[in-house]
Image (spheres, rainbow, N blue to C red):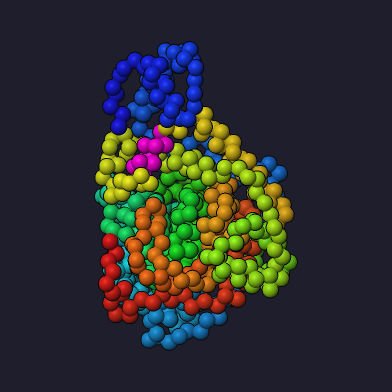
C-alpha cells in the first residue's frame, strides 16, 4: 500500500483530497498546503518504518470514570446457591445444558467427575459441531487436565469455584501451545508461548479448557478462514459475531461456559442471536494481557453462559488488573448478584420498544414492573453518536497497519465493502482533526450517560434498538444481554452478509439488553436474574440428536 512514490503535491491534489474529507479550502490555502505537505508525508513515512509491538498500548489510556465518580461499595459477593438436582449419570443432555454452577456443585458432591463431564462435551462436539462450526480446534490435553483435577478432588484439594467445569475460549485469546490464529488467514501459524491472563485465571479457578472457539476474522462477524459459524436455533443464518463460536457453543450445550471479547457488539450480538447470556463488563475490569489488540480504548473480555448466575461466577474468577494492560483496574467485584429488584429505577428511551418486533421485550418490561421495578422515561441528547464508530475504525486500522501496508490483508476471506481490509484503508482518510473532535464527542457521551445514571439504576433496550448499544460501548458501561422469549423470523443478515432468500422463518430467541452503572455489575446481574426467573425459558435448541443439523454445512 505504501509504495514510497515521491511527487510534488499540487493544488489539484489538495482539492481532490478535500472532496474525500468533505471539506473545502480556498485556492491560496491549497497552494500553501501543497508547499508544506511534503514534510508531513516524510514524517509519516518515517514513523511507519518503526516496528511497534502488537501489545504496545497507546500513550493515552481511556478512563471511563469522570471526575467525581462515586464508586459503588461492592461488599462481599453474594451468589445464588445452586439448587438444580443431579439428573442422573446417564442423562448426558441434561448434564450438558446445566448451569456451570450446578456442574461445579455436582463435582464437589461426588455425583459427577471432571473427566465424565469433559467426555460428555467432547462427544457432543464430535456429533454436533461439524454442522455448527463453533470450534476452531480442541485442546488435546483437556482429558488429562480433567483427570488431574479429579485426583486433586479425591484428596480434598479443590482448585477453585470452577473446579472441573469445561470451558471454551475465543480464538483471539492466547493459549500456550495451542494455535491462536485470530480467525484470519495471515495468522494461521501463530502459536503463543504463554497463556493470556484470563486463561491463567480460569485454570487457577479449576476450569478445564476444551478448545478454541471460532472468531470472525480479526474480531469481526462470524466468517473465518474455516467457514462460518451457524446459529444453533436456525442454521440458515450465521451466529453473528465476533464471539460467534463461543455463543453458539454455549447455546448448543457444547461447553459449561465460554469467554468472548467485545469492541462493539461482539459479545452481545451473538448472545442475542444464539440465545446465550452475554456479559460485557465495565471497561478495565478484566485485564486483556495476551488478547488480540483491536481497539485499546474499547476492547473488553466477558463470559457467555446459559445462566445469569454463571456470569457472576466467571466474572469473579477473571476480575482484576495486570501490568500488561494499562487500562485494567483492580476494582473489587462484589455485592448481591441475585435478589429482589423491587425499588430499582429502570430507564427506557422513547421509541426503543415501539416496533412490532419488540413484543417479547415489552413483555419483559411488564415482568420487571411486576417485580417492583419502576420504569422511567429518559432521553439522550440528539447527537450523532453513530459517528463514534469512526474512532473504532481508526484504532483497528492502527492495530493492523502492518497487515494493510504489506498487502497481506488481501489474504483475508472477506473483501467486500464492509470487511476489514476496506475499512482499514478507509480509516486512513479520517483526518486527525476529526479524530480529536470525535474523542471530544465521546466525552460528551460519557457525561450524557452519567446524567442518565443520576436518575436511574439501570437502562434497558431490545437488542440493536436505539443509540444505547453504540454509545455505551464508547463510555465503558457494562451490558447484560439475555434471552427473554422467542420470535418467529426468517434468517437475518450479520456483519454485512446477506441472509439466504426464501428461507422459512423459525422460532429464535429474542433478547433484552440491560446496562448498569460503571463497576456496578452485581446490581445489573441481580435484575437480570430476577427477570430470567419470570421468563422460565427452555433454551435447548432443536439440534438433531444423532447427526447434528442435517442438511447444513458450517461453511
Q: Position of residue 549 (x, y in %)?
A: 31, 73
Q: Is residue 426 magenta?
A: yes
In the rendered image of this protein, does residue 240 appear above or below residue 308? above
Q: Position of residue 521 (x, y in %)?
A: 60, 59
Residue 107 appears anywhere in the view: yes
In the rendered image of this protein, does residue 487 appear above or below residue 18? below
**Which quarter of the figure is the C terminus placed in?**
bottom left
Q: Please tell me which residue is depicted at 54% across the width and 50% down the height of the picture.
A: 470
Q: Is residue 133 left or right of residue 88?
A: left
Q: Nearer the viewer, residue 314 or 62?
A: 62
Q: Is residue 246 left or right of residue 298?
A: left
Quarter holding residue 212: bottom left
Q: Please tell me which residue is depicted at 41% across the width and 21% down the height of the picture.
A: 14
**Which quarter of the figure is the N terminus placed in?**
top left
Q: Please tell me which residue is depicted at 47% across the width and 43% down the height of the picture.
A: 392
Range of the magenta residues?
A: 420-428
Q: Please tell me which residue is depicted at 31% across the width and 17% down the height of the picture.
A: 7
Amino acid at each position: 500500500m505504501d509504495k514510497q512514490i515521491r511527487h510534488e503535491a499540487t493544488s489539484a491534489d489538495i482539492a481532490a483530497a478535500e472532496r474525500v474529507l468533505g471539506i473545502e479550502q480556498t485556492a491560496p490555502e491549497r497552494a500553501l498546503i501543497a508547499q508544506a505537505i511534503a514534510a508531513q508525508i516524510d514524517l509519516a513515512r518515517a514513523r511507519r518504518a518503526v516496528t511497534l509491538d502488537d501489545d504496545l498500548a497507546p500513550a493515552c489510556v481511556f478512563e471511563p470514570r469522570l471526575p467525581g465518580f462515586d464508586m459503588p461499595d461492592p461488599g462481599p459477593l453474594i451468589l445464588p446457591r445452586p439448587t438444580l438436582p443431579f439428573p442422573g449419570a446417564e442423562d448426558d443432555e441434561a448434564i450438558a445444558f446445566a448451569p456451570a454452577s450446578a456442574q461445579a456443585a455436582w463435582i464437589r458432591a461426588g455425583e459427577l467427575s471432571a473427566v465424565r463431564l469433559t467426555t460428555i462435551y467432547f462427544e457432543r462436539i464430535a456429533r454436533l459441531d461439524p454442522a455448527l462450526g463453533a470450534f476452531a480446534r480442541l485442546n488435546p490435553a483437556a482429558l488429562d487436565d480433567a483427570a488431574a483435577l479429579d485426583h486433586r478432588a479425591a484428596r480434598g484439594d479443590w482448585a477453585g469455584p470452577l473446579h472441573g467445569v469445561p470451558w471454551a475460549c475465543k480464538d483471539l485469546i492466547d493459549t500456550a501451545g495451542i494455535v491462536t490464529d485470530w480467525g484470519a488467514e495471515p495468522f494461521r501459524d501463530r502459536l503463543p508461548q504463554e497463556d493470556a491472563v484470563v486463561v491463567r485465571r480460569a485454570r487457577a479457578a479449576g476450569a478445564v479448557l476444551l478448545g478454541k472457539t471460532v472468531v470472525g476474522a480479526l474480531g469481526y462477524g462470524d466468517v473465518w478462514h474455516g467457514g462460518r459459524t451457524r446459529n444453533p436455533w436456525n442454521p440458515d443464518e450465521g451466529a453473528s459475531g465476533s464471539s460467534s463460536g463461543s455463543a453458539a457453543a454455549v447455546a448448543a450445550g457444547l461447553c459449561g461456559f465460554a469467554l468472548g471479547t467485545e469492541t462493539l457488539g461482539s459479545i452481545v450480538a451473538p448472545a442475542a442471536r444464539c440465545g446465550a447470556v452475554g456479559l460485557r463488563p465495565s471497561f478495565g475490569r478484566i485485564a486483556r494481557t495476551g488478547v488480540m489488540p483491536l481497539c485499546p480504548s474499547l476492547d473488553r473480555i466477558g463470559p457467555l453462559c446459559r445462566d445469569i448466575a454463571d456470569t457472576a461466577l466467571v466474572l469473579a474468577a477473571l476480575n482484576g488488573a495486570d501490568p500488561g494492560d494499562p487500562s485494567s483496574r483492580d476494582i473489587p467485584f462484589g455485592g448481591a448478584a441475585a435478589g429482589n429488584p423491587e425499588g430499582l429505577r429502570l430507564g427506557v428511551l422513547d421509541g426503543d420498544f415501539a416496533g412490532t418486533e419488540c413484543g417479547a421485550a415489552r413483555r419483559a418490561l411488564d415482568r420487571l414492573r411486576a417485580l417492583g421495578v419502576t420504569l422511567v422515561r429518559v432521553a439522550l441528547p440528539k447527537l450523532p453518536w453513530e459517528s463514534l464508530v469512526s474512532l473504532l475504525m481508526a484504532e483497528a486500522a492502527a492495530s493492523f497497519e502492518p497487515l494493510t501496508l504489506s498487502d497481506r490483508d488481501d489474504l483475508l476471506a472477506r473483501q467486500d465493502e464492509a470487511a476489514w481490509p476496506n475499512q482499514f484503508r478507509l480509516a486512513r482518510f479520517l483526518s486527525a482533526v476529526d479524530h480529536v473532535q470525535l474523542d471530544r464527542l465521546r466525552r460528551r457521551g460519557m457525561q450524557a450517560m452519567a446524567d442518565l445514571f443520576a436518575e436511574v439504576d439501570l437502562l434497558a433496550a431490545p437488542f440493536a434498538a436505539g443509540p444505547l448499544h453504540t454509545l455505551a460501548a464508547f463510555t465503558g458501561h457494562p451490558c447484560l444481554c439475555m434471552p427473554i422469549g422467542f420470535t418467529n423470523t426468517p434468517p437475518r443478515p450479520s456483519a454485512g452478509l446477506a441472509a439466504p432468500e426464501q428461507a422459512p422463518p423459525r422460532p429464535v430467541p429474542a433478547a433484552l439488553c440491560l446496562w448498569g452503572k460503571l463497576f456496578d455489575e452485581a446490581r445489573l446481574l441481580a435484575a437480570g436474574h430476577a427477570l430470567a426467573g419470570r421468563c422460565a425459558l427452555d433454551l435447548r435448541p432443536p439440534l438433531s440428536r444423532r447427526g447434528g443439523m442435517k442438511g447444513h454445512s458450517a461453511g
